[in-house]
Amino acid sequence: MSKVPNDRRYTEEHEWAKKQGEVIVVGITDHAQASLGDVVFLELPEPGKKITKGKAFGVIESVKAASDLYAPLDGEVVEVNGPLVAAPEGVNKDAYDASWMIKVKPANAAAYDALMDAAAYTALLQKTAK
Amino acid sequence: MAPKRTPLFDAHVAAGATMVDFAGFEMPVRYSSEREEHLAVRSGVGIFDVSHMGEVFVEGEGALAFVRGLVTNDAAKIVDGQAMYAGLLNERATFIDDVIVYRFSERRFLVCVNASNQDKDFAWIAAQAKEKAPGLKVTNQGADWSQLAVQGPKAVDVVAKLCDEGVRAIGGYHFREGTILGEAGIIARTGYTGEDGFELYVKNAHARKVWDAVLAAGALPCGLACRDTLRLEAGMCLYGNDIDDEHTPLEANLGWIVKLPEPGKERAPFVGMDVLVKQKAAGVQRLLRGLELVDRGIARHGYTVHDEAGASIGVVTSGTQTPFLNKAIAMAYLDRAHAELGHTVFVDVRGKKLKATVVKLPFYRRATTSKA
């Protein structure tokens, strides 16, 4: 079973979001990296770019395929994980923490609380595994 | 229809494989990391369950003449115990499938076909036989045989343990019938990885025993994901991606598997031959080539290729970031005028035109060939 830390929120598209002061840190879940296989390429937006909940903000490519990264909420990108873009295979080692992708200034701070918590996301994974 | 399972399904699950539906079979896509599996085959030894592949046997008086008329490569030019890669074409000279033909004798052949095409291929071969050689026995034995591909520079050591030291003398694209862990099977020095290796054909009841023994001998279990990247590095075509019933072998740059009539030499006609003779004389309009991306990014199946002015000049058929060569490579059909080696083209990757260079296939060639 893949890891689902309790300290953050989740989307149905398998992104995680974590509150860090005023900004929301975004990445993909352990389940997502395991499904993708070996990650070889990451395309992320520039700081300043506006992102929209449910819309693609970037692309992650494994050896096998390209997949969109979906924004967990509306907001503006304030920082991008440059070292991860240079060495995207890090996502496979630890999808959380070190493999954060973007930091977002949310348009509406309450949008974070509307995301799934760890229990709801775990339930989603269990449902899709059946 | 529920996907079929090979006799090794339980072994894959036990080894932690991620299973996917592929060509109607539940197959392992990877066990841990396709990158590690890929590298194991390039440097050591890996094992693949390819039992989903189909086995069509053609047997009886006149089998050689029939097979010469069936596929593009010439079964009269190989000896008993030798195999050849060939195209199975329709009358338009486009691919029904790509196959490996094993010649046991003038009276007995095995045509190894792709899983996704096996029903179609068998129907075609049986219909051809009915029309041209009704005395032949054509049987689809795909459900009886398991196929294990043991691939990599150390594959020969593993196979020698399972069989006998004599397997070291089997040349590339040669095979023999023999015993594998005491059971009758076919030991072929063939593969789909660009590496030395063997494909072992055993009856289903023995598959698990052979699989376990190969793992115990140190081979890493390898899934379909790395099988795809290995074959792509080696410049080998995948049916449904790089070749299909809209392209001829000459367009696919597979002229070497097409034996056309030459002055002073007899050549029994094969299905599609007339079309290929004309196409060769006129020259192809498009050609399958290798691409290496210069700009950062990955070209994928279906992406379009453009010239500097933006005009569409081709389409990508396969592409990935390769684990061993560590660069983005692709195969693409290109308009003949843009297919010269060294030519710069542009691949449309999500709206961005990424620069790529036309290169010769294969991308990877192993340093030494297997000893004959």
Image (spheres, rainbow, N blue to C red):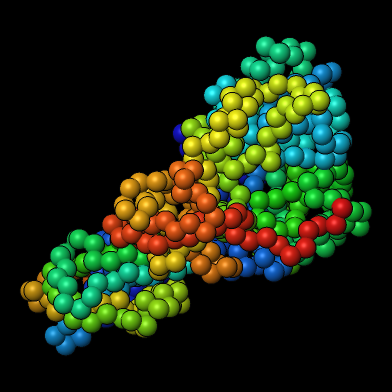
* x 69%, y 69%: residue: B43
* x 40%, y 78%: residue: A86
The picture places residue A40, in percent across and down from the top left corner, at 45, 69
Quadrant of the image occupied by residue A56: bottom left
For the question of whether residue B107 can be seen, the reply is yes
Q: Nearer the viewer, residue A61 or A3?
A: A61
* x 32%, y 69%: residue: A43
Q: Nearer the viewer, residue A48 or A20?
A: A48
B348, above or below B50, in the image: below
A41, above or below B82, in the image: below
A90 left or right, relative to B159: left
The picture places residue B167, in percent across and down from the top left corner, at 87, 53
B199 left or right, relative to A6: right
B43 left or right, relative to B160: left
* x 48%, y 32%: residue: B246
B139, above or below A40, in the image: above
For the question of whether residue A129 can be seen, the reply is no
B67 left or right, relative to A37: right
